[in-house]
Image: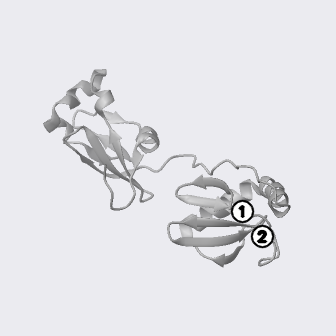
């Protein structure tokens, strides 16, 4: 089953020659253990389910890419490889909900969308205002505030940088 796009933990695919069961153009969206089948071009839920927020994201993606999806449907229904489609991107990345600073100059971050990740601050420690973070006692005073991570003397890191550069964690596993 060719993957068309992946965004926010959602994998959207389209089967080859898959017009018998649902009798209309559709995509399959998987998120963790959930799977849903959505019609093209409407984004109507045909089968299965996703968490409500994830379902809305897929429906918005279908709406944005309906013409590309219909073209891919024609290819897949004819047994040809469909093209990849751009993922859904928020105008703004999720902000920081909580943070734990570790002894190794890494931040364990939980974002507002429920994702967690590790951001390595070591490359920043030689740069201007961040040099103070080399003191591990000071580094560990990091806190979540205003959607980002800050320290007592107002050092902060752009929340988009934290989200985009953090190594995302799989539940139950920590590097």
Viewer-closest of 1 and 62 = 1
Q: Quadrant of residue 125?
A: top left
Which residue is at 47% across, 42% downward?
A: 164
Position of 58 relative to 161 (above/below): below
Q: Is residue 117 left or right of residue 68?
A: left
Helix, strand or loop status at disc 1: loop
Q: Where in the figure is residue 162, as x and y percent of width and height?
A: 40, 41
Expressed as whole percent of the image width and height from the top left, the position of residue 45 reads 68, 74
Q: Which residue lies most toward the left here?
A: 137
Distance (Cα) linking label 2 and label 1:
8 Å
Is 169 positioned to the left or the right of 83 in the image? left
Identify the residue position indicated by label 2 in the image: 18
8 horizontally vs 78: left or right: left
Name the residue beneath numbered marker 1: 14
User: Does residue 21 show up?
Assistant: yes
Q: Mark 1 and mark 2 in contact (Cβ < 8 Å)?
A: yes
């Amino acid at each position: 089953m060719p993957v068309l796009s992946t965004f926010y933990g959602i994998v959207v695919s389209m089967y080859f020659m898959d017009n018998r069961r649902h009798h209309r153009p559709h995509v399959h969206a998987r998120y963790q253990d959930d799977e849903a089948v959505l019609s093209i071009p409407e984004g109507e839920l045909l089968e299965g389910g996703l968490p409500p927020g994830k379902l809305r994201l897929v429906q918005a993606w279908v709406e944005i890419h309906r013409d590309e999806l219909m073209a891919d449907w024609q290819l897949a229904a004819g047994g040809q490889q469909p093209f990849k489609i751009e993922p859904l991107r928020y105008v703004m990345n999720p902000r920081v909900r909580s943070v734990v600073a570790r002894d190794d100059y890494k931040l364990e971050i939980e974002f507002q969308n429920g994702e967690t990740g590790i951001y390595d601050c070591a490359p920043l420690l030689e740069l201007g205002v961040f040099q103070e973070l080399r003191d591990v006692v000071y580094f560990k005073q990091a806190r979540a505030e205003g959607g980002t991570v800050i320290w007592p003397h107002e050092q902060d890191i752009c929340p988009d940088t934290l989200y985009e550069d953090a190594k995302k964690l799989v539940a139950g596993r920590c590097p």
